[in-house]
Amino acid sequence: MSTPGLDGYAEPWRKPEHDDLAEMARAFFLKEVVPHTARLEQQGHPDRAHYLKAGELGLLGLSVPEEYGGGGGDFTHEAVMLHEQQLAGEGSLGLAVHSGIVTGYLNAYGTEEQKRRWLPKLCSGEMIGAIAMTEPAGGSDVQAIRTRAVRTGEDYLVTGSKTFITNGYLADLLVLAVKTDQSAKAHGISLLVCELDDDAPGFRRGRNLEKIGLHANDTAELFFDEFRVPAANLLGGEQAENTGFYQLMRQLPQERLVIGVGAVAAMQRAVGLATAYAKERTAFGKPLVGHQNTRMVLAECATRTRVSRVFLDDCIARHQRGELDVATAAMAKLHLTEGQCEVVDRCLQIFGGYGYTTEYPIARMYADARVQKIYGGTNEIMKELIARAL
């Protein structure tokens, strides 16, 4: 889909290989997954077969080294794939978490044995990945988590609960934030990599949560009652105990950039859909685009989208150089998700009553957008992080 206001714009980091990747990803989402949207929304979770197909095509773990089964690329390749997923209107597969976040943790901190054990299965789609930080009693305050892991011999016994876990209903592999030192806050957090088996003693999946949007993507509660995890599954090895908070903090900028990629792609799609509709729909004897107010709204939304795209690309370039700091990543998450919600809302208004019916994609985009200002750290927390750097 060409985007009014972005025609002729090329990301400064984009190469021909990104164009080839975009074409393949677009074909996969539009041909293999999108035709099943109604069924996937009704069942409340994606098909495992679609993860396997994505893995077969090489769309999973694009930034994972080839020796571990990945694409051997970098974050720009993940960004292109996620951008195409959003442009296609595909919202079932939790690839932003699976490939954009989970593989990043393993690749950055995993021991050689851990990488060889789990990365190939994530890249093939044999395993579905998730990360669990949020708990029923708290979300953005990671230091206050209560889920604990007590070392017993060669294992940890994990007790606690997590909620709002994207991919949680289907996940086979979970990066789990736990307290390994109850007397400390940030200094007492570790990350355990858990292989999830519904028959394992001490582990239980809760509800696949019903949400106002993203109906085809699974979001679940997870419960642990002395769930046994081998000490060898401590991310980074046993010497990495109590370093989980720092691992999280170093990875969160990329997580927020992943959210920003989806936000800008949604803005582009909304402007494209609204512009096309305004040219087709007539009111008072002429197309909607012939009315000044409609043209002004589209002009403002197209401008907001272009500025957001340029900011996003600057953040991606910074991230590639290892220069994306916490405050700038927070700015990206804050500004781009606020822009997504505003642009989608204003574009929906152009559709009038039809924009409120779910047969039009803009309605689903409106509902799906709202969570962007919540997960990955609420936008209120982003403001606090930015303020601290001033």
Image (cartoon, helix red, strand yellow):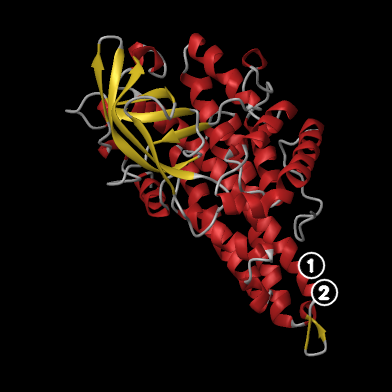
Q: Is residue 264 left or right of residue 16?
A: left
User: How far across and down, in percent of the image, does residue 195 sit?
Assistant: 45, 23
| Identity, as a three-letter code, of the amino acid under mark 2 | Glu
Residue 210 vertical placement versus 165 (above, below):
below
- Tag 2 residue: 280
User: If the image is split into quadrants, where does the N terminus sit?
Assistant: bottom right
- Front residue (pair 222, 110): 222
Q: Could you say which quadrant of the image residue 345 lies in?
A: bottom right
User: How far across and down, in percent of the image, does residue 285 sit?
Assistant: 82, 89
User: How far across and down, in percent of the image, does residue 158 sit?
Assistant: 29, 26
Mark number, residue 276 = 1
- Res. 182 visible in picture: yes
Pick out the residue farthest to the front. 199
User: How far across and down, in percent of the image, does residue 123 sit?
Assistant: 63, 24
Disc 2 element: helix
Residue 47 vertical placement versus 153 (above, below):
below
Residue 143 vertical placement versus 150 (above, below):
below
| Mark 1 Cα shell of 10 Å, populated few (<14), some (14-19), many (≥20) | few
| Mark 2 Cα shell of 10 Å, populated few (<14), some (14-19), many (≥20) | few
Q: Is residue 15 left or right of residue 235?
A: right
- Res. 339 visible in picture: no
Pick out the residue farthest to the bottom. 284
The answer to whether the residue labelled 1 contacts the one labelled 2, judged by CB atoms less than 8 Å apart, is yes
Total residue callouts? 2
Mark 1–mark 2 distance (CA, rounded to whole Å)? 7 Å
Pick out the residue farthest to the left. 183
Residue 162 vertical placement versus 202 (above, below):
below
- Front residue (pair 258, 139): 139
Q: Residue at x 49, y 14 (%)?
A: 114
| Identity, as a three-letter code, of the amino acid under mark 1 | Ala
